[in-house]
Image: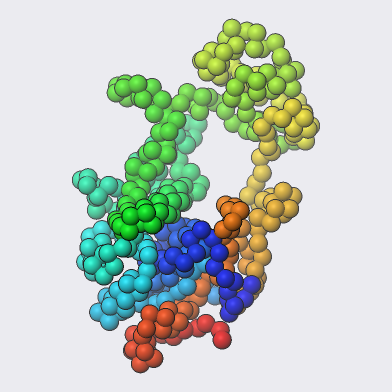
Amino acid sequence: MSESSPTPSTGPLAGIRVIDLTINVLGPVATQILGDMGADVIKVEPPQGDQNRFNGPGHSPDMAVFYLIMNRNKRSIQLDLKRPDCLEALMKLVEGADVVIHSMRTDAAERLGIGYEAIAARNPNIIYAHAPGYRGDGPLWNRPAFDDVLQGETGLAALNASTDGTPRYFPTVIVDKFCGYVLASSVSMALLHRERTGEGQLVQVPMMETMLQFNLFEHLWEGALGKNNGKGLGYTRMFSPHRRPYHTQDGYICVLAVNDPQWRKLLKAIGHPEVLDDPKFSTMSARMRNVNLLYALLADTIQHKTTAEWEKIFNEQDIPNGPVRQLDDLMSDDYLQKTGFFQHHEHPTEGPIVMTSIPQHFSRSPGSIRRLPPNLGEHSEEILREAGFSDEAIASLLAEQGAMDKTAT
């Protein structure tokens, strides 16, 4: 794909324009999802650019891999919003937009002049969205929050504790990514509401509460019955020391049964069909009480065959299973190659790059990868001209930023 000739916009959000004032991970994940679904995403960057442009290796100093991974299907414009003329240029863009998303704390956005009231005054129909750390009506509304902090505060780090009980972060930015997905989904819902009613609105996705709900869908457990003594939370099956990938003769395999028919097939497959006749395992409630014994039996049995042998046995019985793969195995995985999950593109300045495909499928309005991650300020001139600025005004706005449009002609 060549950036000089982006493919036409497709997807359920084609025709929607998003002003993207986000940096780091959460916001860019959300806006890339919207872009993948057809939205025209205008990434407004400060003169120095999104800091992720410098995170990790890359061919160019400001095109590092962390930026490349989550900024496709966007156009980049540089605007120093501390300058009144650049702030006014942003407001002009807002007038023709459907969505504004930022990743600032509320008071910082308001000090800059881009709080909800200021934006809505220029465009009453706007969907204005952000993901603060905490609810806007609570005592922590303006407290800074990042992924690692929220992993601790929502119980995730404790759930992922090492064998000696030391809390550990998940080795992925799970809070930022999940909240980014929720933010993109929430924006889409707000757009649907506007389609039906004509009303724009403020959308907030507080990271703390969003991740607490995510974590407690199963772990609220007995707490759902009103217990408040601090001892009723936690889905017991998740804490079995034997709930882990099972060691085979040559690796590890994951296998799971959750209901009576699956357990019958699984226990028959490992040569122990009689187990379900035991009152300790004959019902779901009994199995839950004795899950450690059941998982220990699986672990002891599965270690005596190879991973491939168990895959064949489990697949023949239609039992959910899969081998444990290392990250470095994924790009050569046969299934992912056949489905085209990893896509290869030629970037105009960065050369060959690899990105993941769009996982969601729409039969009538499929998303598409139309634009590769933009260089800093690549579309500044183009975007300003679309907004009605003259050549002289554009030159004045960009003079101190060194951000003249780099789009190939």
Image point (50%, 28%), residue name? 238
- In the image, is 44 to the left or to the right of 122? right
**Of 282 and 9, which appears nearest the observer?**
9
Quadrant (top left/top right/bottom left/bottom right) for the C terminus:
bottom right
Which x, y percent locates residue 198? 32, 59
Vertical side of 123 occupied by 292: above or below: above
Which x, y percent locates residue 74? 49, 69
Vertical side of 177 occupied by 318: above or below: above
Vertical side of 180 occupied by 62: above or below: below
Quadrant of the rendered image containing residue 187: bottom left
Colour scheme of the rendered structure:
rainbow
Image point (56%, 58%), residue name? 365
- In the image, is 378 to the left or to the right of 294? left
Image point (69%, 29%), residue name? 319
Quadrant of the rendered image containing residue 258: top right
Examine the rendering and report whether any part of residue 148 can be seen.
yes
The residue lying furthest to the bottom in this view is: 392
Image point (52%, 82%), residue name? 407
Q: How many marks overall?
A: 0
Which x, y percent locates residue 53? 47, 69
Quadrant of the rendered image containing residue 210: top left
Which x, y percent locates residue 215? 42, 36
- In the image, is 343 to the left or to the right of 151? right
Examine the rendering and report whether any part of residue 129 can be seen.
no
Quadrant (top left/top right/bottom left/bottom right) for the N terminus:
bottom right
**Of 123 and 119, which appears nearest the observer?**
123
